[in-house]
């Protein structure tokens, strides 16, 4: 399983960096996880967008779906697209207006997922957990069926104790970390301290901080998370074009 960072800022793009989006691959299966601003430009550098097998979305805030519409246009208008291939886009149905927009007739098809159900998605078994956020949002736990490797993505969320069992022993824990220590129990995002504490309690193997703020010393953000996570769990800052082999 390989994860490539396409965008890792929160809220809005800044200084040539886009917002949340990742490419998750296993074998020849290519899954786009969220589609924030600059997704398509970054994706073209590592993969032909027509080679995507599916898209899955944590929620419908603009910084997570800004490039979804242009990806649909790419699939609709690119002369090399196989017209018989439809791109499935997975999302929740708690916002029907956004969910219905996932379908572009003859091009993309909206597919629903539910918190209470496991989703078999190519080589992955995906489970979901609703987070604390101003709109419905879901964290995701991906298990690569062939290897048993585990990747957990928090989506956007404030602190929840339930993240500890949800992220238990994950090989890679990708955590929304938009806030510095001292802002704990925020209604929408983790602080660095909380990301580290959850990683430690869940005994994850690696913590990667994403949904990063545009301002402030990110080395401090990383250091705060590392302090909370202890010395045995490596903590890294997500960076565009960086890949993790899980």
Image (spheres, rainbow, N blue to C red):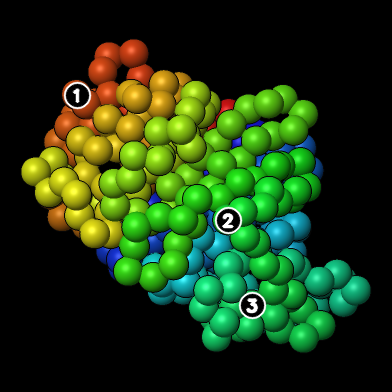
Mark 2 or mark 1: which is in front? 2
Secondary structure, mark 1, is helix
Return the residue at label 3.
102
- Residue at the far left in the pictured view: 182
Residue 94 percent across, percent down from the top left: 53, 74
> Toward the viewer: 34 or 203?
203
- Indicate whether 114 appears above or below 227: below
Residue 121 appears anywhere in the view: yes
Query: Dot 1, how many residues are within 10 Å of its Cα: few (below 14), some (14-19), or many (20+)?
Result: some
Return the residue at label 1.
227
Residue 79 percent across, percent down from the top left: 80, 78
Chain-order first, disc 1 or disc 3? 3
Chain-order first, disc 2 or disc 1? 2
208 relative position to 142: left or right: left
Chain-order first, disc 3 or disc 2? 3
Question: In the image, which disc is placed on residue 115?
Answer: 2
Query: Dot 3, how many residues are within 10 Å of its Cα: few (below 14), some (14-19), or many (20+)?
Result: many
């Amino acid at each position: 399983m390989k994860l490539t960072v396409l965008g890792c800022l929160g809220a809005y793009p800044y200084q040539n960096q886009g917002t949340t989006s990742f490419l998750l691959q296993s074998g020849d299966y290519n899954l786009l996880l969220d589609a924030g601003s600059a997704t398509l430009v970054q994706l073209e550098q590592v993969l032909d967008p027509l080679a995507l097998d599916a898209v899955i979305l944590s929620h419908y805030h603009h910084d997570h779906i800004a490039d979804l519409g242009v990806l649909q246009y790419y699939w609709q208008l690119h002369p090399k697209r196989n017209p018989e291939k439809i791109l499935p886009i997975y999302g929740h149905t708690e916002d029907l207006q956004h969910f219905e927009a996932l379908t572009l007739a003859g091009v993309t098809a909206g597919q629903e997922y539910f918190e209470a159900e496991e989703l078999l998605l190519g080589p992955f078994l995906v489970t979901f957990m609703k987070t604390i956020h101003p709109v419905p949002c879901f964290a995701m736990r991906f298990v690569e069926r062939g290897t048993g490797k585990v990747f957990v993505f928090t989506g956007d969320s404030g602190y929840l104790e339930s993240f500890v069992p949800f992220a238990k022993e994950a090989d890679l824990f990708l955590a929304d970390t938009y806030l510095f220590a001292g802002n704990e129990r925020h209604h929408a995002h983790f602080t660095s301290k909380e990301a580290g504490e959850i990683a430690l309690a869940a005994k994850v193997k690696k913590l990667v901080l994403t949904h990063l703020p545009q301002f402030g010393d990110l080395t401090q953000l990383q250091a705060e998370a590392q302090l909370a996570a202890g010395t045995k769990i490596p903590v890294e800052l997500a960076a565009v074009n960086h890949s993790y082999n899980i």
